[in-house]
Image (cartoon, grey):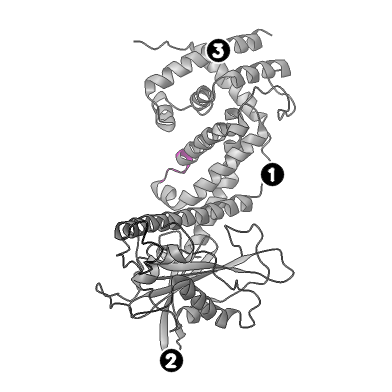
């Protein structure tokens, strides 16, 4: 079937008239900085969605494992944690940190830890507060959310009396650098290394990644990586940045180097859904 | 200068230069609704920012910006609370130069009466000057669909254009 051919005069007239119409549009005077800010927020949201997707996959797998293990009648009494292998859908990083310390492919098994995930995150929160909020005035006291999947972490609100804004401290502990997908470096990010004094007085190498208004600092421990980020705007929970929230990367590195952090055990990771009341 | 600063500087330069053009395109896509056009432009630029490193490396910034703009318009018209309606009032009118207000209104009314997808074809083909193949690629339809949509749209617009030409 042959398509009808538009009349060239009609086409030419339409082009001219469309340009006339478009020329009458009055583009609003919008500062480019507003477009940049909206772009940054989109990047943050995209990252949050990626994290939520990974978490949802873990919950589905963990829930399926739990159902396979126990029937409906014994679920209430059988509280033995499920030792899943946490088959996380970890995307392949575009560029893994090049100067990060290498991690053993067969990491040592984490020692037994009686704390559940909620308690573990609360303890980590206290570690963060011991550096950033010694008077316990700003940092959210009880972790109310969890990031899981390729590791375990949480986002803690940071408030300031007299300010309507809400900032955020985000913490994520994983087995390897590649699992720290927040810190992947590509050409849009500024990544560098930093040396700070560790808890035992020795030097500790940290990695810093800055992009989209966020600053992440990560430190390699023995068999796991601790990474932290601070942001004056808790993107998912607030629209107003908090005032006076300024933490140096060196301070963040010292927090990340603290030896009270540990790699979550399989039991702790599998217990995330129970600790937060999610369906298993 | 860090990579993020470089990215933002390049993005800022691009937006400063091309934002008016993107707004005018969105203005036509939205049938003359300047507020909705601005919403579409803002959505498109946020997507462009997020994709900037990849798009800039590929050297396809204009093409990508055009596509996200069209997709943002598609998303816009899919929102049930923002269904399109023919625009008769509230157009952003500057001082007339060229067609009269009556001619302009006739064409706007005819454009607004087109299905949004058909209007996208018209804008891409006859305002942006894309080929049939380029338009088909941008809209994710076949070249045959672009041709038939173009012919049908022109037939519908012909009366409004003729009215304007004979005034």
Secondary structure category for the residue under label 3 = helix
Task: Specify the segment rendered in magenta.
Answer: B59-63
Q: Could you tell me which residue is drawn at 73 percent across and 28 percent down?
A: B90
Residue B24 placement (x, y as % from top left) = 61, 33
Say which chain tag 3 marks: B
Determine contact: label 1, label 2, CB under 8 Å.
Answer: no
Determine contact: label 2, label 3, CB under 8 Å.
Answer: no
A70, A106: nearer the viewer: A70
Q: Would you name the residue on which mark 3 appears?
A: B156
Q: Could you tell me which residue is drawn at 51 percent across and 27 percent down?
A: B120
Left or right of A183? Residue B116 is right
Q: Would you name the residue on which mark 2 appears?
A: A200
Residue A158 sits above or below residue B102 on the image: below
Q: Quadrant of the C terminus of chain B?
A: top right
A267, B38: nearer the viewer: A267
Q: Could you tell me which residue is drawn at 43 percent across and 47 percent down?
A: B55
């Amino acid at each position: 079937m042959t398509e009808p051919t538009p009349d060239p005069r009609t086409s030419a007239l339409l082009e001219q008239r469309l340009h006339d119409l478009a020329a009458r549009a009055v583009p609003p005077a919008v500062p480019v900085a507003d477009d940049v800010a909206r772009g940054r927020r989109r990047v943050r949201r995209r990252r949050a969605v990626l994290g939520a997707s990974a978490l949802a996959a873990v919950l589905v797998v963990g829930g399926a494992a739990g159902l396979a293990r126990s029937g409906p009648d014994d679920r209430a009494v059988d509280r033995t944690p499920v030792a899943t292998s946490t088959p996380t859908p970890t995307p392949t990083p575009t560029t893994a940190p090049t100067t990060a310390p290498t991690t053993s492919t067969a990491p040592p098994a984490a020692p037994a830890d009686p704390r559940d995930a909620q308690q573990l995150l609360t303890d980590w929160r206290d570690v963060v507060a011991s550096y950033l909020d010694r008077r316990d005035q700003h940092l959210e006291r009880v972790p109310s959310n969890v990031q899981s999947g390729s590791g375990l972490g949480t986002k803690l609100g940071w408030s300031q009396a007299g300010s309507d804004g809400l900032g955020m401290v985000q913490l994520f502990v994983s087995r390897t650098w590649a699992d720290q997908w927040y810190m992947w470096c590509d050409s849009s990010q500024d990544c560098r290394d930093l040396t700070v004094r560790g808890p035992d007085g020795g030097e500790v190498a940290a990695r810093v990644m800055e992009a989209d208004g966020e600053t992440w600092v990560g430190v390699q421990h023995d068999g796991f990586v601790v990474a932290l980020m601070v942001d004056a705007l808790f993107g998912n929970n607030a629209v107003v940045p908090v005032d006076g929230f300024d933490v140096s990367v060196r301070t963040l590195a010292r927090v990340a180097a603290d030896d009270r952090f540990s790699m979550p055990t399989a039991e702790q990771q599998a217990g995330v859904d129970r600790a937060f009341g999610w369906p298993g | 200068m860090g990579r993020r600063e470089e990215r933002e500087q390049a993005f800022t330069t691009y937006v400063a230069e091309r934002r008016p053009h993107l707004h005018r395109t969105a203005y036509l896509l939205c049938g003359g609704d300047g507020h909705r056009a601005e919403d579409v432009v803002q959505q498109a630029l946020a997507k462009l920012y997020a994709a900037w490193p990849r798009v800039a490396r590929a050297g396809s910034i204009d093409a990508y910006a055009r596509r996200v703009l069209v997709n943002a318009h598609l998303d816009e018209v899919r929102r049930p609370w923002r269904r399109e309606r023919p625009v008769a009032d509230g157009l952003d009118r500057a001082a007339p130069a060229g067609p009269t207000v009556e001619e302009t209104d006739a064409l706007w009314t005819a454009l607004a009466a087109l299905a949004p997808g058909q209007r996208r074809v018209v804008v891409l083909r006859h305002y942006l000057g894309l080929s049939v193949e380029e338009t088909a690629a941008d809209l994710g339809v076949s070249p045959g669909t672009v041709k038939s949509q173009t012919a049908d749209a022109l037939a519908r617009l012909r009366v409004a254009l003729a009215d304007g030409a004979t005034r």
